[in-house]
Image (cartoon, rainbow, N blue to C red):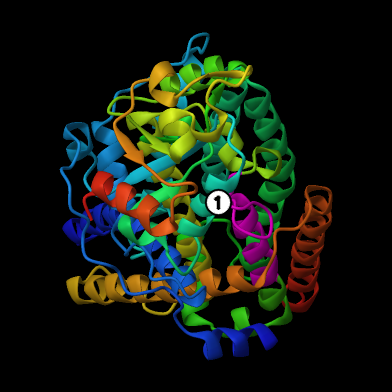
């Protein structure tokens, strides 16, 4: 009963949807038609970006209302959200994850590390940026990027 | 008369097939609103299915016929069951074949096909999911059988349309202790069979806690669309069966067009209500640990056994 009272007192916590983000929709994303399944790949991140991705799917930002949903298998996924500089040990798993996804598939590099290795550039365990390992379609810059920016990138893919 | 019967069968199949994604979308929407979220909309499962049908089909290396046949078999068994079970009308051309044991076997066949597909992928999670699904199924199928037997004793038959017709004529059968015990047992069995909380979490991302999802991790594209549609149809069908057995009012017992139209509207209303109640209940419940699932299911089996016993001694004496 305490939970019921809490639900009634809290009401809706999702913030009103911001206007649709500017920028061109990637060509391959047009076929998806408002439904995008997302698989996160941590290729060596400090987990700052993971916290922001988790926040993007919480009740306040609610990325699910735009048709994006996190899934447990790359076979189910249309979009790979890759975070962090790609470490030597994660380069092959990342290639295999992207290869396991069915076409049409998109790769989104989230965070400065994923785009240009950021703080970790030149480290002995770093293979390179995400674009050195797999072709990428979208970038979300920031260290870490805000949940609103991650959602803006996902909305460009879902088109909602 | 015959035209109405065939229309009723076609209507049941179309209602379950087209209504299943809508019911799932409705349940997700109710859940989202209770959690303070905006929700993706009732039509989202249809958008997911449309997208999956457009995607590239993938057959993982090393998989065999069991993996390829399972999605079609799952949907086919559910369609046949939807034609048999009296969701709209008890007076259909196939109602003579709608035996309880046939219906439960068809549901079990779909479960078995998916478990074999999980084993066929050869991955650790596929095998783990299949073994867990079989553990749950071994406890759930007898419970479904026994709880409906409690209703079939007063009716004197295991034919489901006959049981439903009898209950419409004599509502006292449902208000008896046996009927109440049976509805509790069948409700728990339906939750377990369709992989809902507290037995399984349909939206989990943690492979170690998965049951149903672990078996379908390797499916992609159109095959995944079929597997998801099959799972959604089974939920719709079993909730429909539950409402047909215990809230049978409104189901057409004669071959008239007006009764059929009323039955269709009432079926939709019952499913929307049941779906909302289930989604709201899931917000309040947590998934139980896997090792406690057999305790929960054994409890529901015991309720079903008590229902049959009570039904035999209380109504069989007369």
Q: Residue at x 26, y 77 (%)?
A: B262
According to the picture, the residue beneath numbered tag 1 turns out to be: B202
Label 1 marks which chain's residue? B
Q: Judge whether A149 appears above or below A32 on screen.
A: below
> In the visual, does B254 lie left or right of A61?
left
Tell me which corner region of the image, top left, top right, bottom left or bottom right, holds residue B15.
bottom left
Towards the viewer: B179 or B5: B179
Magenta-highlighted residues? B182-205
Q: Position of residue B55 (x, y in %)?
A: 28, 30
* Pick the front one: B190 or B246: B190
Residue drawn at the location 49% of the way across and 63% of the way down:
B239
Residue B313 percent coordinates (x, y): 80, 73
- Report if residue B84 lies within the magenta region: no
- Secondary structure at badge 1 equals loop
> Residue at left 54%, top 91%?
A9
Q: Quadrant of the N terminus of chain B?
A: bottom left
Above or below residue B179? Residue B193 is above
Residue B253 in view of the camera: no
Toward the viewer: A28 or B172? A28
B25 or B73, which lies in front? B25
Spot occupied by residue B26 in the image (x, y as percentages of width and height): 38, 66
Relative placement, left or right, of B117 versus B226 is right
């Amino acid at each position: 009963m305490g939970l019921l009272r809490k639900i009634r007192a809290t009401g809706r916590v999702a913030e009103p949807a911001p206007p649709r983000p500017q920028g061109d929709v990637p060509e391959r994303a047009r076929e998806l038609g408002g439904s995008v399944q997302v698989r996160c790949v941590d290729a060596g991140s400090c987990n700052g970006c993971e916290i922001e991705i988790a926040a993007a799917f919480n009740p306040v930002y609610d990325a699910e209302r735009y048709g994006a949903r996190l899934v447990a298998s790359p076979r189910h996924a249309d979009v790979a959200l890759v975070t962090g500089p790609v470490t030597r040990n994660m380069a092959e798993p990342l290639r295999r994850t992207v290869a396991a996804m069915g076409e049409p598939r998109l790769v989104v590099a989230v965070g400065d590390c994923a785009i240009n290795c950021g703080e970790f550039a030149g480290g002995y365990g770093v293979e390179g940026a995400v674009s050195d390992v797999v072709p990428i379609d979208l970038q979300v810059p920031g260290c870490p990027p805000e949940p609103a920016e991650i959602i803006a990138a996902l909305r460009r893919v879902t088109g909602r | 008369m015959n035209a109405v019967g065939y229309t009723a069968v076609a209507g049941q199949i179309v209602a379950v097939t087209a209504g299943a994604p809508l019911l799932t979308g409705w349940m997700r929407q109710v859940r989202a609103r209770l959690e303070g979220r905006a929700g993706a909309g009732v039509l989202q499962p249809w958008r997911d299915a449309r997208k999956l049908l457009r995607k590239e089909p993938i057959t993982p290396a090393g998989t065999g016929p069991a993996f390829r046949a399972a999605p079609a078999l799952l949907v086919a068994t559910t369609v046949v069951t939807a034609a048999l079970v009296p969701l709209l009308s008890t007076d259909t051309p196939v109602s003579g074949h709608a035996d309880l044991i046939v219906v439960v076997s068809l549901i079990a066949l779909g479960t078995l096909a998916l478990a074999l597909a999980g084993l066929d992928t050869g991955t650790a999670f596929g095998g783990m999911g299949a073994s867990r699904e079989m553990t749950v199924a071994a406890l759930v199928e007898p419970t479904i059988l026994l709880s409906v037997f409690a209703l079939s004793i007063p009716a004197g038959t295991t034919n489901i349309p006959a049981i439903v017709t009898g209950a419409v004529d004599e509502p006292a059968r449902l208000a008896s202790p046996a009927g109440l015990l049976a509805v509790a047992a069948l409700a728990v069995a339906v939750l377990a069979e369709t992989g809902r909380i507290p037995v399984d979490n349909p939206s989990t991302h943690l492979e170690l806690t998965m049951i149903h999802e672990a078996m379908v991790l390797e499916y992609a594209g159109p095959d995944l669309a079929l597997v998801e549609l099959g799972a959604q149809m089974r939920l719709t069908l079993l909730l429909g069966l539950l409402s047909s057995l215990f809230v049978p009012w409104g189901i057409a017992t004669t071959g008239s067009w007006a009764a059929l139209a009323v039955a269709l509207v009432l079926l939709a209303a019952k499913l929307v209500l049941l779906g909302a109640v289930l989604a709201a209940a899931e917000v309040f419940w947590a998934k139980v640990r896997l090792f406690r699932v057999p305790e929960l299911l054994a409890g529901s089996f015991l309720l079903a056994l008590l229902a049959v016993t009570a039904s035999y001694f209380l109504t069989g004496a007369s």
